[in-house]
Amino acid sequence: MIIVTKVKIMVKVKTKFKRPPLILPVCLIGANVEEKPNFQTIAWFNMVDYDPYLIGFSSEKTHYTNKGIKENKTFSVNIPTSKMVSVTDYCGLYSGTEVDKSKIFDVFYGELKTAPMIREMPISVECRLKQTIESHNADFFIGQIVGVYIENKYLVNEKPDLKCIDPLLYEDGFNNYWSLGKFLAKAFDIGKQFKHQRK
Amino acid sequence: MIIVTKVKIMVKVKTKFKRPPLILPVCLIGANVEEKPNFQTIAWFNMVDYDPYLIGFSSEKTHYTNKGIKENKTFSVNIPTSKMVSVTDYCGLYSGTEVDKSKIFDVFYGELKTAPMIREMPISVECRLKQTIESHNADFFIGQIVGVYIENKYLVNEKPDLKCIDPLLYEDGFNNYWSLGKFLAKAFDIGKQFKHQRK
């Protein structure tokens, strides 16, 4: 008698993918181009340094926004809620050379005067350009944060309420938008349990 | 008779926050330091360019990992699931100078030979260091992706299954871990509806 046992072997292998399916935040980069506000959807952005805090983001060299950032040396980062998925995608689909995006939002300015921010979005960050790193296809802009603007209704006990902000997330490389799930644990804390278990 | 109507005015104002509460992906950066694998938890990473794809991340100059990356000119990016929150936090809480992290995971190597990758995590990315940009407190390392490793069970119809990968997310500046929510819409598509409405 032969006993056949079906064993499914799971192996981690090199795939055909050129980049990982990262879940990324989504923002609209605001810049004045030819003195008119323009907004470009970007997911390739993150913090770069602290004290002072720097934000870096990557934008294709040919993009309309890049021109404005180089002119004014300022830009903004605006965080949409998941309900703003349609207008956010729109600002990524169409260039400022094709459509006028200056009237879509209620625009306001901060102390830098030339970084247009979006009043309807829960969070806006005003940045002064500090450095531009040229890559092969993209400009990597690094800006110093000069102001973080949040509407009161998105704060609870003076802290941002992420459930209320409900940020839009993006699956890189596979073109899907996702929402935020649930709170899991405190960082710089839950890991102490693992340390305890290791002993 | 006086009629009092309570009107709650919502104003978007400059806050005391120095950086926005971004929801970011979390990874463990793998590097051999003094010929032993070490892993550091990082949320300040993202894509920088395409063709070839580049990943950039920021790591404090004093970090143990930086030494290994500068030595070997390689590193890995490993994406944990939300269930790995405790060990992920642990690798961010304690430096490789304090604890030996070389035996926590089942480590494997790819073609670069010196970028340790974590078999237990759904996604591992092998990178060759291309450029290091010095900021005031951090090194910003830019690496070229040479391989994306994913276990079969995280793929459906040859595409990554984000529900199954269940990536861990991090709320920057406020030390909270979150899970991924639900699929919302297709990118580069839903925005066409907004264009239609605008006409």
Image: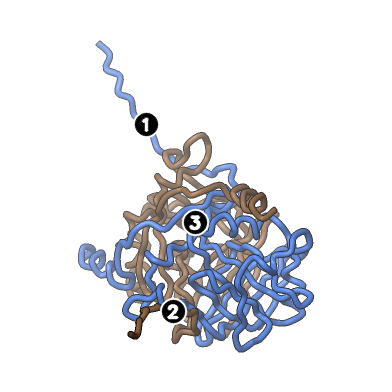
Chain colours: A brown, B blue
Identify the residue at horizontal 64%, vertical 52% (top origin).
A197
The vertical placement of A134 against A41, above or below, is below
Return the residue at label 3.
B23
Horizontal and vertical percent position of residue A183: 46, 48
Chain letter behind tag 1:
B
Residue A180 lies, with reference to residue A23, above or below; the image says above
Would you call the spot at circle 2 few (<14 residues within 10 Å), some (14-19), or many (20 or more)? few
Q: Which disc is residue B8 wearing?
A: 1
Label 2's element?
loop
Instruction: Say which amino acid is labelled 1.
Output: Lys
| Mark identifier at residue A9 | 2
A39 and B118: which one is in front? B118
**Direction from residue B186 to residue A7 in the image, left or right:** right
- Percent x, y of residue B137: 74, 62
Residue at disc 1, secondary structure = loop
Q: CA distance from mark 2 to mark 3?
A: 35 Å
Q: Quadrant of residue A144?
A: bottom right
Determine which quarter of the picture holds residue B28: bottom right
Say if residue A38 shows up in the picture: no
